[in-house]
Image (cartoon, grey):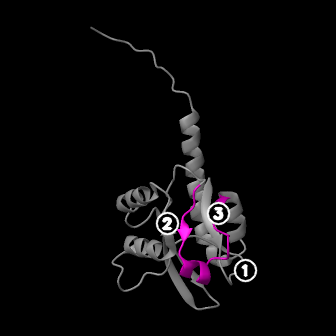
Amino acid sequence: MQLLSYSRKGEKSSYDTFGGTQDATDRCSKDCLVRELLEEVSTMPKGWQRLIDEATTAYPEGHNTYYSIKWQKQESHYTTVWFVQVPDMKDTPGTSPQFAREECTLDSLEWRTAADVLVNLNQYMFHQSLILIIQGAKRQHQANQRQKRRPRVQRPMSNMW
């Protein structure tokens, strides 16, 4: 499983992905994600917007949520997470100039293995809940991949007339 992430500026190279803080104009987590994507992404690879729309419509409160606390800053966060499978990981979205200037370390947006992201996030107590969510998604992805590769067994049929 690959995850699209970048290195945050000023966060000791902590990996992150698109999204941000819900504000007064956001009615729900989905609205926040849509607004943040519009602010952070300048160009979206073909077909991605449809996949994002499908995932956020099917799961408006995310695939998972977690609550975390940054004790040093006395901040608490309630975070909603969506995992969106895209057809081609050769593509990455273009980032907006403001996002690149303020949040993302230059040229750090890339596809990384889930294992690599987990090692990075494990350096920070703040990310422990997210780590559990990614591990669960990784296990589910692996199970789905095994299911796809499993040959279908033709079952003998019995007919009674």
**What numbered label is drawn on residue 152?**
none
Q: Position of residue 10 (x, y in %)?
A: 68, 84
Cα separation between marks 2 and 1: 27 Å
Region rendered in magenta: 91-113
**Element type at mark 3:** strand
Can you say whether 143 is above or below 91 in the image? above
Which residue matches tag 2? 43
Q: Position of residue 123 (x, y in %)?
A: 73, 74
Q: Is residue 66 visible?
A: no
Give the mark, 3 or 1, whose residue is nearer the N terminus.
Answer: 1
Q: Nearer the viewer, residue 22 or 73?
A: 22
Q: Nearer the viewer, residue 36 or 118?
A: 36
Q: Residue at x 45, y 15 (%)?
A: 156
Q: Residue at x 60, y 51 (%)?
A: 139
Name which residue type carries label 2. Thr
Which residue matches tag 3? 110
Label 3: few (<14), some or many (≥20) within 10 Å? some
**What numbered label is drawn on residue 12?**
1
Name which residue type carries label 1. Lys
